Image: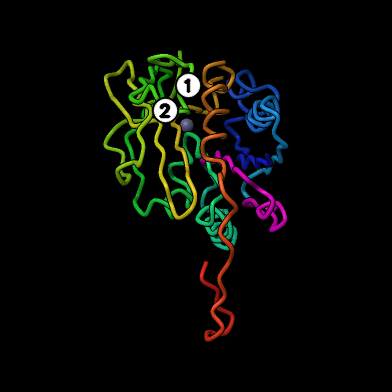
Amino acid sequence: MKVTVVCEHNASMDSEEGKKAYPEGLGVCLKNMLEEAGHTVTLVRMDENGADSLTDEIIGNTDVMFWWGHWYHLKVSDEIINKVADRALRGMGMVFLHSAHDSKMFKKLLGSSCSLKWREAGEQERLWCVDLTHPIARGLGEYVDIPQEEMYGEPFDIPTPDELVYIGWFRGGEVFRGGCVFKRGRGKLFYFNPGHETYPTYKIPQVRQLLKQACEYVAPQIPLREEINCPHIPEFSIR
Ligand code: ZN
């Protein structure tokens, strides 16, 4: 299928730790991971100039979109946010990673602040699977360990997830709904908390398997809903 990875590039990724974690770049790591699964992947860079290379053509040809952003959420134009959100509601799958919880896109689709507790101390996270029958967790056992991760903790201001797959526990004592599925319109989205840019979390085989399975799970199973144009309202379309 056609997958688009929208990934920020920030100065933290150019730090010694960032380069050690992902010498090839975090976005390229995600792209390679999804290509391993047989997908055709387009990588779109987000930075201080926003995500302007996310064109209508790319959006219109995407089955599943991955989104990793942190510093530059507010630089992404509302026009792009609206176009992507529209396609997501018509059936495109989305996977939001780590600090994408604070993106305009995630908040628009969820309708809440999506705020959380956090601490950057390189702690162990153990992601406990709370639904062993879920396709995203297939073959991964009771838990996935991440040696070093940024702590994200409850309260996480999100609507009650439609499907809760993982709860993360941190060495410092906090817990977090770190693997959640939400259904919006005809589309599905998955949020996954691990993936701070200075820890090589997306190199861990179990995490890669989990994200490939998430990509399959949120992928559209039926054709995307068409646009509906109302003839009575000029230039108006019900999307
Ligand atoms: Zn982070």
Residue 43 among those drawn in magenta: no
Position of residue 213 relative to residue 148, above or below, is below
Relative image position of residue 178 (x, y in whole percent): 38, 30
Q: Nearer the viewer, residue 109 or 149?
A: 109
Relative image position of residue 92 (x, y in whole percent): 56, 49
Relative image position of residue 166 (x, y in whole percent): 37, 27
Residue visible at 69% across and 34% down in the picture: 39
Residue visible at 32% across and 30% down in the picture: 153
Label 1 SS: loop
Q: Going by the image, does 76 lie left or right of 152?
A: right
Q: Quadrant where the N terminus lies?
A: top right
Q: Nearer the viewer, residue 69 or 159?
A: 159
Residue visible at 52% across and 66% down in the picture: 239
Magenta residues span 49-70
The label shown at residue 148 is none
Q: Quadrant of residue 176?
A: top left
Q: Quadrant of residue 65?
A: top right
Q: Residue type at mark 2? A: His
Q: Quadrant of residue 79?
A: bottom right
- The residue beneath circle 1 is 138
Q: Residue type at mark 1? A: Arg
Residue visible at 64% across and 23% down in the picture: 22
- The residue beneath circle 2 is 134
Q: Nearer the viewer, residue 13 or 193?
A: 193
For the residues labelled 2 and 1, the Cα–Cα distance comes to 7 Å
Label 1 crowd bin: few (<14), some (14–19), many (20+), radius 10 Å: few
Image marks 2 and 1: residues in contact by CB distance under 8 Å: yes
Relative image position of residue 24 (x, y in whole percent): 70, 25
Label 2 SS: loop
Q: Is mark 2 within 8 Å of ligand 1?
A: no
